[in-house]
Structure formats: structure tokens, C-alpha cells
């Protein structure tokens, strides 16, 4: 299929095109709503489904549930992408929506461990696997479907609506949860009320399916199908031929990887940093993030529109460059604005950890089950990292027990290699209490003071981080669609998107925390998104073609 450049034509959206955008976006909002519910209600889900199993089994189940959220998305992209390129876009994303909705509804009805035993967590994980697979197939279908309906000169604008759906899905899930909480006591919500948002999804599923069933197949795909020109083996054609596979690799490394880490940093790591590192209370942190999202979300549409005028690549590359250049100063400023007492303590009372470096682990723990308590170095570092205290690492003689130096106070970490069971737990608890008292003594706060938060400045920083997100994410769907020919488009664009966002982006919070624990600096976790964004910037500038004038209809 030719993808020659063409001059853009003036075009006014028809009612059918508005239906295409609205129905595709609404369905994708619904799928993100389902996906976010699990994360938002994870504490209640764990209590009902994982509490009755032993620690080892609970670890395995937690790892499997985590894997369902991130690892399986690319496999869903391959599976449903292939179907979408053979059968059609419309029917495929109807199937993904039905799978996602029914899986979510089942979670709301699923008996807990106390009723059906180990079958409960097993069924839960199966539902999560189905959700991950469905989400892997949904995005590519929606983006491809909208793009193939869009005029050549408005493809960025039209597909930008799809880009708003993850944020809108998050809002919707939080709204339903908040309404449910407001109408129930804390005990009722913990006992059964947490199921209500999952059950509500069946109504959303019905509405979304009905609207999407009003749609016709993509005209570009239908024409190709009528001519018998569809691919018989899209996976082999997309990734078995180097001419196509190299474009998918380039799309991943030269666009999507950077987009993913900027997206996760601006929307998820910023929340993690506010709540876990700066110790802003959860309600305030969520409120501040929500305001930042509200301010920033219209820029998805703006940058999608702008990409139709000046190109996709300049905007995506500019977003990666701005993020890489400004993340460190912005997050330092965020500390000053949200927890000035912590910023002052870091300046005035530096902390040092003296340890045998060979005994220190790299504390990467994606499922949050590792206690890092088998060596004194890990005990010291884990405590300081979770307390959001920056520290300097100093080498100590081999075989020595780790020490924390806080001002004039020297605290010896417990030699946990020589302890086990309750004795180890008691020693760690005593050490942590002493260390916490010493930190408070030199001005390290246990929580951010709400009265001291510079709210306008915090919101401005968060909104700017979201605007970076909109720069890299707003034009990405149009670019991915334009990079690949129609016959393998669904398959080809879905895989790099979900590897980038599921793996590069999904691992960002845990990787960043591990870097912080290893280096001692609460800002060093930012090196992960900065390095990935810079790599994408370099590869994108050197090798990524501009696509915005390509005619995908011919």
C-alpha cells in the first residue's frame, strides 16, 4: 500500500465521525475504569482473596496478579492484533470490551477465600489475566479504528480523544469508589461495599457495547477485505519480515519507551512521590493530582491538533527533552513546596550509612512482598528509603554490621544474619524506633504539615508534569497508525505500544524505588525515566520518520 505524502484537505467532522470518536473513546474509558479498579481496591481484594494462604503462596499469587497487569498486555496485543487484522477492527474491540467487562463483573461476585478456599485467588488471577489480555487488544483497535475513519489532515486531533481515556478512566473509577464510600460505613465498605464498583461495570459494559454496535467496520479495512487483500498471517508478516519488524522496534525505542516513562512519571510516580516520599496525606495527594490532571487533560487534544499542523515527531521529542531536562529541578521544587520541613532537614542534617557494600541488595520488589531483612545493610537502607530520608553511602570493612549516622547519633543496625523469627522482628522494630526518634530530633518530619504546603505551586508543578504527558501521548496513536500498512496495522502498532507502556512504564515505580534504596538519594529514582527519555530522544531524532502527511487510505 502506498503511503506517499499528500496535501491535507479541509474537512468538517460528520455526525458519523463524531459517533466513531465518541463510541471508541467511551469504550476505552470503560476498559481503563475496569483496569484501575483493581489497583485502587487492592487492599480490600488482598484481604478477601489472599489472607488465608501461607506467605509463600501469597507471594506467588501477588506476583501472578501483578504479572496480569503488566506482563500479559503485549501478549493480548499479539493475540487480538492478529484477529483485528484478519477479521476486522470493530468486532475485535467488541470482544475485548466484553471480556474486560465480564471479567470485572465476576470479581464483584466472586466468593472470598473463607468461602471457597484457594479457588478464590486462582479465579481472581484468571480474571486479571483476561483483563490484561483484553486491554492489550483494546487500545490498538480503538486507535486504528478512529484513525482509519479520520481525514488525513485531522488524524492527530481525532485519535487524541483516545489518548484522554486512561485519565478519564482513572477519574471514573475514583468517582464511583468515592460515591460508594460516602454512602457506606467504613466497616460496610470493607466487608462488601468494595464490590459495588466492580458490579456497576456491567451497566457500563451494556451501554458501551450498545453504542459500539452502532458502528460500521473501518472503511479502509472493509475495502481491503472486499478486495481480498487482507493479511493471512499478520504476525509473520509484521515481525517475521525485517522490513516491518525494524519499524516496530524503532517505534518502541524511538517513541513509545520515552512516552511511557514520561506518562507514568507525570501521572503515577508524581502521586507516589507526593504520598510515599513527601508524606503528604493520601486524600490531599489525590486531590492535588486530580486538579493537575484536570488542568492538563485538554492539552491531549491540543497537541493532537498541533501534530496535524507541524508533525508528530517534533512534539513527542520535545516532550521527552523537556522531561529529561527538568525532572530533577521540578521534583526538588516539589519537595520544597509540599514538605518544606523535609527539604530543610536534608540540607541541615545529612545522614550516612556505613556498610559492607557486598552485603547490600538491589531492592527491586515489584509485588511488595520482600522484607529485605536478611542483612543489616538492607535493614538500614530499607528503613531510610521508606522514611524518605536521603543518605550518603560509605564503605565499611568486610563483615562489619551496618551503621546509620544521624547528626551526632550513631545507630548500629541489627545483625539480622544471626537472627531469625521473632527475635529478628523485635530487633528490627527496636532499631527502627530508635532511628525514627533520632531523625525527628534533627528535624525530619514523619508527615508533611498540611498548613505548610504551598498548594498553588504544587498544583502548577503537577500540571506541568501532566502537560509533558500530553506532549508525548497526544500524538502517539496517530504516529503509530501511520507507521504501519493497513493489512498489519492493528498487530504492528499494538505490540510496541504495550511493551513500552506495560513494561518500560509499568516497572517505573518499583525500579525508581530500588534505585533510591541503592543510591540513598530520594531523587535518584528519576534517573530511570530521564535515561529512557533521552535514549528515545536520540533514537527518535536520528531514525524516526515523520508521518503526519502520510495517506493511510490509499
Image (spheres, helix red, strand yellow):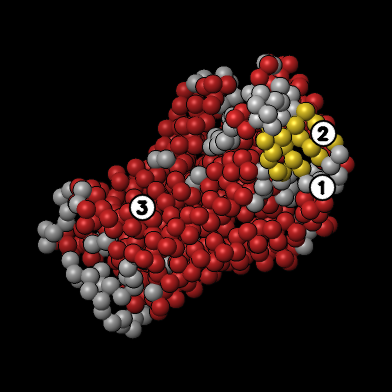
Q: Residue at x 73, y 66 (%)?
A: 456
Residue 337 visible somewhere in the drawing: yes
Q: Is residue 475 above or below residue 53?
A: below
Residue at image point 72% right, 43% down: 391
Position of residue 405 relative to residue 312, above or below, is: above
- For disc 3, the marked residue is 496
Q: Is residue 7 left or right of residue 305?
A: left
Question: Relative to the observer, which residue lies in front, 505 or 223?
Answer: 505
- The residue lying furthest to the left in this view is 228
Q: Residues within 10 Å of mark 1 (few under 14, many from 20)?
A: some
Residue 73 or 29: which is nearer the viewer? 73
Of circles 1 and 3, the one toward us is 1
SS at badge 2: strand
For marks 1 and 3, the one nearer the N-term is 1
Between the residue at mark 3 and the residue at mark 2, the CA separation in whole angstroms equals 50 Å
N-terminal-most mark, 3 or 2: 2
In space, the residues marked 1 and 2 are separated at their CA atoms by: 13 Å
* Residue labelled with disc 1: 349
Q: Is residue 440 left or right of residue 386?
A: right
Q: Secondary structure at mark 3?
A: helix
- Residue that numbered label 2 is attached to: 410
> Crowding near pointer 2: few (<14 within 10 Å), some, many (20+)?
some
- List x then y, in percent, for residue 147: 33, 66
Amino acid at each position: 500500500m502506498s503511503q506517499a505524502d499528500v496535501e491535507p484537505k479541509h474537512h468538517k467532522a460528520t455526525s458519523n465521525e463524531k459517533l466513531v470518536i465518541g463510541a471508541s473513546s467511551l469504550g476505552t474509558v470503560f476498559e481503563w475504569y475496569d483496569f484501575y479498579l483493581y489497583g485502587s481496591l487492592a487492599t480490600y481484594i488482598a484481604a478477601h482473596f489472599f489472607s488465608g494462604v501461607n506467605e509463600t503462596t501469597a507471594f506467588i499469587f501477588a506476583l501472578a496478579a501483578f504479572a496480569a497487569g503488566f506482563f500479559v498486555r503485549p501478549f493480548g496485543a499479539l493475540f487480538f492484533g492478529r484477529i483485528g487484522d484478519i477479521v476486522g477492527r470493530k468486532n475485535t474491540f467488541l470482544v475485548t470490551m466484553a471480556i474486560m467487562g465480564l471479567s470485572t463483573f465476576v470479581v464483584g461476585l466472586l466468593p472470598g477465600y473463607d468461602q471457597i478456599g484457594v479457588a478464590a485467588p486462582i479465579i481472581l488471577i484468571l480474571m486479571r489475566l483476561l483483563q490484561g489480555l483484553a486491554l492489550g487488544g483494546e487500545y490498538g483497535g480503538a486507535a486504528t479504528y478512529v484513525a482509519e475513519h479520520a481525514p488525513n489532515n485531522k488524524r492527530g486531533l481525532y485519535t487524541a480523544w483516545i489518548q484522554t481515556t486512561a485519565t478519564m478512566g482513572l477519574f471514573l473509577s475514583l468517582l464511583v469508589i468515592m460515591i460508594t464510600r460516602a454512602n457506606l460505613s467504613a466497616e460496610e465498605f470493607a466487608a462488601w461495599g468494595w464490590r459495588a464498583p466492580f458490579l456497576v461495570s456491567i451497566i457500563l459494559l451494556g451501554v458501551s457495547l450498545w453504542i459500539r454496535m452502532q458502528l460500521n467496520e473501518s472503511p479502509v479495512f472493509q475495502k481491503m477485505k472486499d478486495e481480498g487483500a487482507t493479511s493471512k498471517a499478520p504476525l509473520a508478516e509484521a515481525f517475521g519480515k525485517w522490513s516491518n519488524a525494524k519499524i516496530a522496534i524503532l517505534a518502541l525505542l524511538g517513541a513509545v519507551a520515552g512516552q511511557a516513562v514520561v506518562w507514568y512519571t507525570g501521572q503515577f510516580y508524581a502521586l507516589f512521590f507526593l504520598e510515599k516520599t513527601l508524606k503528604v496525606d493520601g486524600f490531599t495527594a489525590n486531590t492535588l493530582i486530580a486538579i493537575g490532571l484536570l488542568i492538563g487533560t485538554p492539552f491531549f487534544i491540543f497537541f493532537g491538533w498541533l501534530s496535524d499542523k507541524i508533525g508528530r515527531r517534533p512534539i513527542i521529542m520535545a516532550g521527552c527533552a523537556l522531561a529529561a531536562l527538568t525532572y530533577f529541578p521540578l521534583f526538588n521544587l516539589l519537595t520544597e513546596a509540599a514538605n518544606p520541613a523535609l527539604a530543610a532537614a536534608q540540607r541541615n542534617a545529612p545522614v550516612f550509612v556505613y556498610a559492607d557494600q557486598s552485603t547490600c541488595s538491589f531492592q527491586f520488589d515489584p509485588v511488595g512482598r520482600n522484607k529485605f531483612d536478611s542483612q543489616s545493610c538492607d535493614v538500614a537502607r530499607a528503613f531510610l528509603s521508606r522514611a524518605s530520608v536521603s543518605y550518603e553511602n560509605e564503605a565499611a570493612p568486610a563483615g562489619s554490621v551496618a551503621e546509620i549516622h544521624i547528626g551526632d547519633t550513631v545507630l548500629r543496625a541489627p545483625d539480622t544474619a544471626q537472627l531469625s523469627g521473632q527475635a529478628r522482628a523485635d530487633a528490627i522494630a527496636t532499631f527502627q524506633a530508635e532511628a525514627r526518634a533520632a531523625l525527628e530530633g534533627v528535624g525530619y518530619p514523619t508527615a508533611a504539615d498540611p498548613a505548610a504546603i504551598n498548594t498553588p505551586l504544587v498544583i502548577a508543578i503537577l500540571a506541568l508534569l501532566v502537560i509533558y504527558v500530553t506532549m508525548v501521548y497526544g500524538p502517539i496513536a496517530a504516529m503509530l497508525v501511520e507507521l504501519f500498512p493497513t493489512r498489519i496495522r492493528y498487530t504492528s502498532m499494538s505490540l510496541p505500544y504495550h511493551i513500552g507502556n506495560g513494561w518500560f512504564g509499568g516497572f517505573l515505580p518499583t525500579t525508581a524505588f530500588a534505585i533510591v534504596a541503592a543510591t540513598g538519594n530520594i531523587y535518584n529514582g528519576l534517573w530511570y525515566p530521564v535515561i529512557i527519555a533521552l535514549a528515545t530522544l536520540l533514537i527518535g531524532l536520528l531514525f524516526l520518520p515523520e508521518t503526519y502527511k502520510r495517506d493511510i487510505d490509499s
